[in-house]
Image: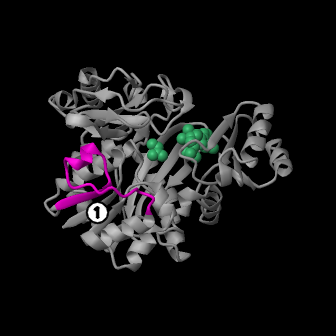
Amino acid sequence: MNILLIGSGGREHALAWKMAQSPLVDVVHSAPGNPGMDEIGPCFDVAADDVDGLVKLALQIEPDLIVIGPEAPLALGLADILRARGFDVFGPSREAAQLEASKAFSKARMIKYGVPTAAYGEFTEAAPAKAFLRSMQAPYVLKADGLAAGKGVVIAESLEDADAGIDEMLSGKFGLASATLVIEEFMHGEEASVFVITDGQGAVYLPAAQDHKRVGDGDTGPNTGGMGAYAPAPAASEQSTARVKRQLAEPMLKGMAKDGLPYQGVLYIGIMITAEGPKVVEFNARFGDPECQVLMAGLAGDIVPAILASATGGLKGNEAAFESLLELDRFRPTATVVLAAKGYPGSYSKGSLIRGLKDAEKIEGVTVFQAGTDSGPDGALLANGGRVLNVTASGDTLRQAVDRAYAGVAVIDWPEGFCRSDIGWRALR
Ligand code: AMP
Ligand code: GLY
């Protein structure tokens, strides 16, 4: 089978790496890909949000399966357009992807289907938004409705800061994405990410992962796209996982299907494990990045049958068969450490030289996934983004996985990069 994979981040490098190991797969083509993905299969210079260019490319390659990694092309309706052309596509329709692309849409669906989440209000005017704030307790959670590259959430400690946040967002801090605002109750608890592969009817669950969103050790500093992850996350106990399935995932998938918006692809459920049980923090229409990297590296079995069935149907009633192909019971504890360019998530420079990836991969269990990289002259590897490398390792225990990942970090020669030194701390404490 030939696959066309859309995207160029660490998530897509991990997906390409994992799918290429499947006995079902001949070639993984990528667009636009990155230097790491180029070692797996051919990369085509078409941007992930260039819908016309991607359709043209698909017609040229005629892949048996198209896997869409990032949210931007999903929100643009790429999956619908490709399906209309007869392709099998892993990724939700534009309408179903609104679960990520519009927080107001997502909250309204959760309420409609009785899925536990934070109480909220939705606003386009400052005065009613500020009046609503006064019915809530600090800290105040403000969210831009639309896609804002993971930066659209403000958590304000005081009413003054929250008022200022409302004014900023409604006056266009995130452009159209913050023309509508969601204000939410603050939920206390531990977070985890749950990934459900679904064809809209049946569903297969991957082990829960935990991301590290803040830039600094001890979860300090501004939010980022994610500075590291590990799985399985012990925070998601067997009991809370059962509740996530029964109370969050199943009603959501059933409701969407019943309303004519069947969700096909991977549904990312960001959960908060509160004193009253798990609640939804957010839905995303794709794999998490860097959560995907630990899931792909930790999975012992084949992910392609589940991804293919999500695209073509046939999961319902056959979940156990797909789970056994995934070999979930043999999932290995895995951690990934993100190496980012100094300055990230603020401004940073590009073009610095990175060395030592192959040496890092000589360490048992270590794989380095590339994200913001570019190739320079004479095969040199250059930094080309904020989050640049994902040093990923599996082990017999999470402790061993984390130690191996940091041993990999130590041999990578990139003075312009930095990482958190405490990935996995909640599980290891
Ligand atoms: P989101 O983009 O909705 O996932 O929000 C980004 C981060 O903000 C989440 O991962 C949480 O750490 C935090 N957050 C969002 N909503 C809430 C909430 N209602 N209560 C507490 N923390 C939240
Ligand atoms: N790691 C968080 C996300 O992918 O949204």
From what the image shows, is residue 6 above or below residue 55?
above
Quick one: quadrant of the C terminus? top left
Is ligand 2 within 8 Å of the beta carbon of the residue shown at mark 1? no
Q: Residues within 10 Å of mark 1 (few under 14, many from 20)?
A: many
Q: How is the image coloured?
A: one colour
Kind of residue sitting beneath label 1: Leu
In percent of the image, x 74 and y 41: which residue is there? Answer: 168
Residue 314 among magenta residues: no
Residue 44 among magenta residues: yes
The image quadrant that residue 62 belongs to is bottom left
From what the image shows, is residue 239 above or below residue 2?
above
The image quadrant that residue 57 belongs to is bottom left
Magenta-drawn segment: 27-50
Q: Is residue 276 left or right of residue 427?
A: right
Quick one: quadrant of the N terminus? bottom left
User: Residue 17's x, y, as percent?
Assistant: 23, 49
User: Residue 122's x, y, as percent?
Assistant: 73, 55
The image quadrant that residue 336 belongs to is top left
In this orientation, does residue 92 appear?
no
User: Residue 43's x, y, as percent?
Assistant: 26, 54
User: Residue 146's x, y, as percent?
Assistant: 61, 54
Picture mark count: 1
In percent of the image, x 64 and y 53: which residue is there? Answer: 177
Front in this rendered view, residue 316 or 338: 338
In this orientation, does residue 22 appear?
yes
| Residue topped by disc 1 | 4
In percent of the image, x 65 and y 47: which residue is there? Answer: 174
Front in this rendered view, residue 201 or 387: 387
- In this view, the residue farthest toward the front is 377
Q: Is residue 426 left or right of residue 320?
A: right
In percent of the image, x 51 and y 32: which residue is there? Answer: 345
